Image: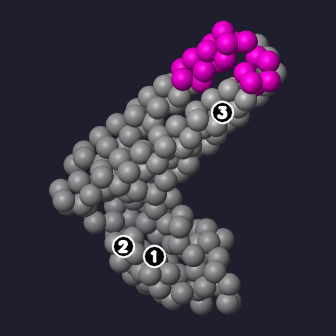
Amino acid sequence: MSEEVQMALDEAKEQMTQAIQHLESELQKIRAGKAHPNMLDGVKVDYYGSMTPLKQVANVSTPDARTITVQAWEKNMLDPIGTAITNANLGLNPQSNGEVIIINVPPLTEERRRDLTKRVRAEGEHAKVSIRNARKDANDMIKDAGKEGLSEDEVKTAEAKVQELTDRFSSKVDDTLKVKEEDIMTV
């Protein structure tokens, strides 16, 4: 196998792996009725004039399956943290007792579960588009190598390997989506 073909395959595999990792990180943000500290990953707090990720100004934990607690490292940050969580539009209602912020995660309604499932499928489709784009880029590199002297048989073999890689990563996306959808739809 030529160096150009190997480089195209490696690059495609790298891009497809990144698409899967991105999908998994996005799916972690979609709650399935259970409290999880990652639910607050996207929250940014106004920390003395600069927008700072919540994890850099407080400790986020889950004492049980329905509760998230946020322990601010500075007491005067409780109100800005509560405001940031409310403004993040996560459907959560933070309550402060003066020392920690307590967030009760409400159980999901059937309609909300269906909406979340649609969102999960949309994220999956984005991942598949990224995988197909990686396939297209790899095939373009292989065709260019074919124009520069790579034999037709080697081009066909390389394109088959790229398709095999694409199929493998697409099935990973499907498996990941199936697990998340079951998690969401389980009451």
Q: Do callouts 1 and 3 mark residues in contact (Cβ within 8 Å)?
A: no
- Give the alpha-carbon distance from disc 1 to disc 2, as whole Å: 9 Å
Is residue 19 or residue 33 the one in the foreground?
Answer: 19
In magenta segment, residue 149: yes
Q: Looking at the figure, which quarter contains the N terminus?
A: top right
- Identified by mark 3, the residue type is Asp
Position of residue 172 relative to residue 184, above or below, is above
- Identified by mark 2, the residue type is Leu
* Between discs 2 and 3, the one toward the N terminus: 2
Say the numbered circle drawn on residue 88: 1
Few, some or many C-alpha atoms within 10 Å of disc 2 (few <14, some 14-19, many ≥20)?
some
Say the numbered circle drawn on residue 92: 2
Is residue 36 or residue 120 the one in the foreground?
Answer: 120
User: Which quadrant would residue 56 be assigned to in this image?
Assistant: bottom right
Q: Do callouts 1 and 2 mark residues in contact (Cβ within 8 Å)?
A: yes
Find the residue positioned furthest to the left: 110
- Identified by mark 1, the residue type is Ala
Highlighted magenta segment, given as a residue range: 145-164
The colour scheme of the drawn protein is: one colour
Few, some or many C-alpha atoms within 10 Å of disc 1 (few <14, some 14-19, many ≥20)?
some
